[in-house]
Amino acid sequence: MHKDIVEVVKNDPNYKELVAKRTSFAVKLSIIMLLVYFGFILMIAYFPHVLGTPLSEGSVTTVGIPVGMGVIFFSFIITGIYTKRANGEFDDLNNKIKEKVKGM
Amino acid sequence: MINRVFLFLILGSIAVFASNAVNAPRELNVSAIVMFLIFVGATLGITYWAAKRTKSAKDFYTAGGGITGFQNGMAIAGDYMSAASFLGISGLVYASGYDGLIYSIGFLVGWPVILFMIAEPLRNLGKYTFADVASYRLRQTPVRILAAFGSITTVILYLIAQMVGSGKLIQLLFGLNYEVAVFIVGILMILYVTFGGMLATTWVQIIKAFLLLSGATFMSVAVMAHYDFNFGKLFAHAVELKDVSIMAPGKLVSDPISAISLAVALIFGVAGLPHILMRFFTVSDAKEARKSVFYATGFIGYFYILTFIIGFGAIVMVLGKPEYLDLAKQAISGGQPILGGNNMAAIHLSHAVGGDFFLGFISAVAFATILAVVSGLTLAGASAISHDLYSSVIKKGQVDSVTEMKVSKMATVALGIIAILLGIAFESQNIAFVVGLAFAIAASANFPILFLSMYWRGLTTRGTVIGGSMGLATAVVLLILGPAVWVDVLKNAEAIFPYKYPALFSMTVAFIATYFFSVTDNSQSAKEEKEKFEAQFIRAQTGIGAEGASSH
């Protein structure tokens, strides 16, 4: 990449905004995802009986079923949330940055 | 010329298939073979079509970079939904219920992390392989050699697991000899990859993913229809036939350290699997790369829910039914063993819900799944050899795209032959540890260097090479000293390293060593490497200067 482009982009407020917003968003979502998953795993390791408790009196379906399915749905939804914001808001910012260095 | 070779190989493999089918020792599954031949015919047609469009190295490695996010999501899901995960996870649910769900969730949660951290910079910085990214601002030769070594090791381990699994599965489903089955898989895979490159490999993967999801959906709906689409009723009946323990966590996760170490291997291992990472170069830009992960996560999550239903379906519809009972085994060990073992639960269920015809369909899909997955793996291994080792290390980048593609095709043929030989050599070995090792190496060697090269300014060549090598060595040594190899394979009484999954330890070693040998690196080249980070980071974040799609 040309040195001039690096200088222009580096000082572009849009670039600073993009990096700050996206980094914080990605880090937050990653932490949430890891907390959910490791929470699930540690619950299995330390309190397996909690997940084995029936949902209601006389039911064979245990708490673990909706919790496990919930982790699957959560993984899908959280990728959707990130993709939507990144493909909208972040890409708009990114296009402004690209516009500025076009032809350089 | 190419056409004639192509035709010859097709006719050759069909002839081998047919002649052996006639002499097969076991009862033939005619509908399965017919459906499989239709699949092979269609995919070879696609390969022929793709071969005419594959003219440059870029076409060969990345299908020209014009695959859409949706298509790529389907192909990624296809790479992930191997026969091992379809049959293995449904078999695990069949055998121990809830534990199967825990296991499959572990394979899914790596995807959001890939999206948030890896997908976008990977797409913006790389061209054909993840080594492009790792070596972006570092010294090409040592970093490429390390990354290529990590890629090829992961690919070969994965290939061994797939080849052995496929040989046994095909033997069981189609009544073919083990060697013949391995040979057919190897030959077809070589055909797809050498002639059709990434374009054919991607479409074979998409078609197979569609067939597998359709088949699994049909089975799940058929099972649920018996219970008025009420999960409670299905579970109640399953508990009646087995016992209440299948509804709660069981033996899969024994101690917290093993649990966390397995989780680390699964989450970060996915982000270091070369055949998965390579798929991100087939889309046009970061936007499509993100969509790919979104769709892939959806398909994979849906698939795991289906395998859970299928496992329970097998409990209620296969367990204890005389037609699926392995009488010989029962006579020795008692209980109610099913023919072919627990991994055949989904296959038997397909017969229970759809008769011989649907059994044939699912068997053919399982075979197709193996083919598609080994093709993707081989392509990733071949590109590490041709792009990283030949073109970048040996020729220092001074090589034209046509020559590089030729080398890639030769590497594919070589890897195909190696896969066949290893598949035969490992037939009766205990290879349960192999996939675990592949994930451990991916998480401990490939992932740390990829991640740090993207995000850490202070990374230097010295740190990368020493840290990556130490991560790889630690993973291999701990696995050998652990219960999976030391006890199960080498038959020692007690393991020297107590945990089955080394990733937590080996990945930590890799990160610490990389950090230490980078910060203590005061060389002039280290200084220059740090200065180059800014430009790299801008390209990673914005995509300015990134590889685009090819024009056709």
Image (cartoon, coloured by chain):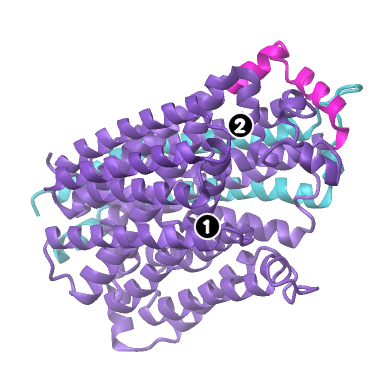
Chain colours: A cyan, B purple
Callout 2: SS:
helix
At label 1, which amino acid type do we have? Answer: Gly
**Secondary structure, magenta segment, majority class:** helix
At label 2, which amino acid type do we have? Answer: Ile
Viewer-side residue, B62 vs B404: B404
Q: What percent of the width, then of the height, locates residue B503?
A: 61, 65
Q: What percent of the width, then of the height, locates residue B62?
A: 26, 48
> Mark 2 Cα within 10 Å, few/some/many (few <14, many 20+)?
many
- The residue singled out by tag 2 in the image is B347
B232 lies above or below B151? above
Q: In which quarter of the image is residue B349?
A: top right
- The residue singled out by tag 1 in the image is B269
Which residue is pictured at 26% across the width and 34% down the height? Answer: B46
Look at the image and tell me whether residue B152 can be seen. Answer: yes
Magenta range is: B219-245
Q: Which of marks 1 and 2 is in front?
A: 2
Viewer-side residue, B227 vs B48: B48
Which residue is pictured at 75% across the width and 50% down the height? Answer: B252
Q: Mark on residue B3?
A: none
- Magenta stretch contains residue A93: no
Q: What percent of the width, then of the height, locates residue A50?
A: 84, 40
